[in-house]
């Protein structure tokens, strides 16, 4: 099996607010995913043609976890952004303070070619492509998909891949992101939940 690097994952670099590797190249991460797949170290994704490859513990220290836990002292700032010109805008929220959580696990998300070509999202002709690198905070077994990603997928919008989620999956996504947010370097936090909670008190 060959796993190529999709252009989408290349945005995951330092200061992006996303999981990134300190020294490993994207090609070496994709090769590691191939090796782990051959060992059976993977689980099913949210639909057929999507797999979650579990990185070996030997490389975990190379990945920076983008999450911090928020509390009443966390200062948040929001703005309207979009990932690309053809996608809908969403509210991005950052925080000015917070300590990044330690990486406990790393999942490598790969998509099969036929799934990617549904929306012309393949950037190679390989059977599988590395789409995302997700560092999971120590103490957690997994993290739910972000609600904006779920919304794009379920409504089959630009940038999404068709899927249908259970009520419990939506609830877990919002619950997780109500407590933990994505960190950016210098304590700027990129939040992947894009709902506004209006406080009356």
Image: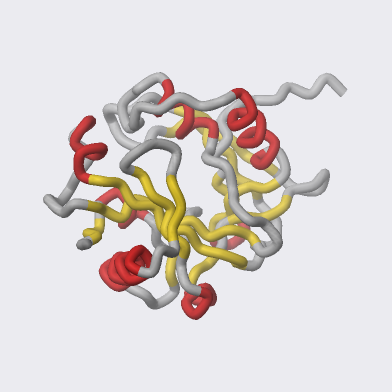
Q: Is residue 168 above or below residue 105?
A: above
| Residue 85 drawn at (x, y percent) | 28, 31
| Residue 19 drawn at (x, y percent) | 48, 59
Q: Is residue 172 left or right of residue 72?
A: left
Residue found at x 64% / y 67%: 102
Q: Quadrant of residue 185?
A: bottom right
| Residue 95 drawn at (x, y percent) | 64, 47
Residue found at x 68% / y 47%: 180
Q: Is residue 31 above or below residue 92?
A: below
Q: Give the residue furthest to the bottom.
A: 58
Q: Is residue 135 left or right of residue 96?
A: left
Residue found at x 65% / y 33%: 174
- For residue 43, say whether it is visible: yes
Q: Give the residue furthest to the right.
A: 201
Q: Is residue 46 above or below residue 188?
A: above
**Depth check, front residue: 16 or 2:** 2
Instruction: Name the image quarter holding the N terminus.
Output: bottom left
> What is the image's colouring?
secondary structure
Q: How many marks?
A: 0
| Residue 69 drawn at (x, y percent) | 72, 52
Residue found at x 65% / y 40%: 177
Q: Is residue 113 left or right of residue 56?
A: left
Instruction: Name the image quarter holding the C terminus.
Output: top right
- For residue 188, say whether it is visible: no
Q: Is residue 108 above or below residue 193?
A: below
**Depth check, front residue: 171 or 22:** 171
């Amino acid at each position: 099996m060959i796993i190529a690097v999709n252009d989408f994952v290349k945005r995951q670099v330092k200061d992006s607010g996303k999981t990134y590797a300190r020294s490993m190249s994207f090609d070496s991460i994709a090769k590691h995913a191939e090796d782990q797949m051959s060992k059976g170290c993977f689980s099913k994704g949210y639909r057929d043609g999507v797999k979650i490859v579990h990185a070996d513990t030997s490389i975990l220290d190379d990945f920076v976890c983008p999450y911090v836990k928020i509390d009443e002292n966390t200062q948040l700032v929001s703005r309207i952004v979009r990932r690309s010109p053809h996608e809908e805008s969403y509210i991005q929220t950052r925080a000015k303070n917070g300590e990044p959580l330690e990486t406990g696990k790393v999942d490598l998300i790969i998509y099969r070619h036929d799934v990617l070509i549904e929306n012309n999202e393949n950037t190679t002709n390989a059977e599988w492509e590395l789409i995302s690198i997700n560092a999971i905070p120590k103490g957690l077994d997994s993290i739910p998909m972000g609600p904006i990603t779920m919304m794009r997928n379920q409504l089959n919008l630009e940038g999404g891949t068709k899927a249908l989620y259970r009520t419990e999956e939506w609830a877990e996504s919002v619950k997780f992101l109500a407590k933990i947010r994505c960190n950016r370097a210098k304590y700027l936090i990129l939040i992947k939940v894009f709902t506004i909670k209006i406080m009356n008190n």
